Image (cartoon, rainbow, N blue to C red):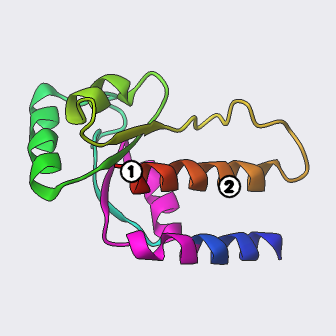
Amino acid sequence: AEMQRYRSRQQVRFAPLAQSPLLVAHDAYGYLLAEFGLQNVSAVVLDPHHGHASARRVNELAQRVKREQIGCMIGEPGFAEGVGKRLFPEGHGNLVVIDPMLSGISPARDAYLIALIHLADTLYGCMVTR
């Protein structure tokens, strides 16, 4: 019941942002974005086994960021900060870092829901702040 209320609230919250493009570190975030009805333009890393984006890929994405006015990127600790700073120089969009290990979330009965709320709040802040 609580999870369904969470989903409903987030879908309403993100509905006005459904057409706002954003980048993600890799395609695993597609599930989160689909949950909120959001548009993933592209993943920085297309092959998760490769582990990093080539210079060519970063240049292609930088052009796309400008052309499509992409204002938000979801990265991970130690991964996307460097690429994110190249794609979004200071003052030209937002890079948020989401920890997939959920560091800082205390184990509790409702820890999963707390983690999802934190993810949603972080993503929302990235998308509405320009």
* Relative image position of residue 53 (x, y in whole percent): 24, 31
Label ID, residue 27: 1
> Which residues are the magenta region?
11-36
Task: Please give the name of the residue rendered at 60% of the width and 69% of the height, measured from the top-left corner.
Answer: 10
Magenta stretch holds residue 15: yes
Q: Which residue is mark 2?
A: 117
Main SS of the magenta part reads helix
Q: Quadrant of the N terminus?
A: bottom right
Q: CA distance from mark 1 to mark 2?
A: 20 Å
| Residue type marked 1 | Asp
Q: Are marks 1 and 2 in contact (CB under 8 Å)?
A: no
Q: Which callout, 1 or 2, points to the residue nearer the camera?
A: 2
Mark 2 element type: helix
Task: Please give the name of the residue rendered at 44% of the width and 48% of the height, measured from the top-left corner.
Answer: 126
From the viewer's perspective, is residue 73 above or below residue 42? above
Task: Please give the name of the residue rendered at 65% of the width and 48% of the height, measured from the top-left corner.
Answer: 118
Q: Nearer the viewer, residue 35 or 45?
A: 35
Q: Residues within 10 Å of mark 2 (few under 14, many from 20)?
A: some
Q: Earlier in the sequence, mark 1 or mark 2?
A: 1
Q: Quadrant of residue 128?
A: bottom left
* Relative image position of residue 37 (x, y in whole percent): 45, 72
* Relative image position of residue 58 (x, y in whole percent): 16, 34
Q: Is residue 118 left or right of residue 74?
A: right
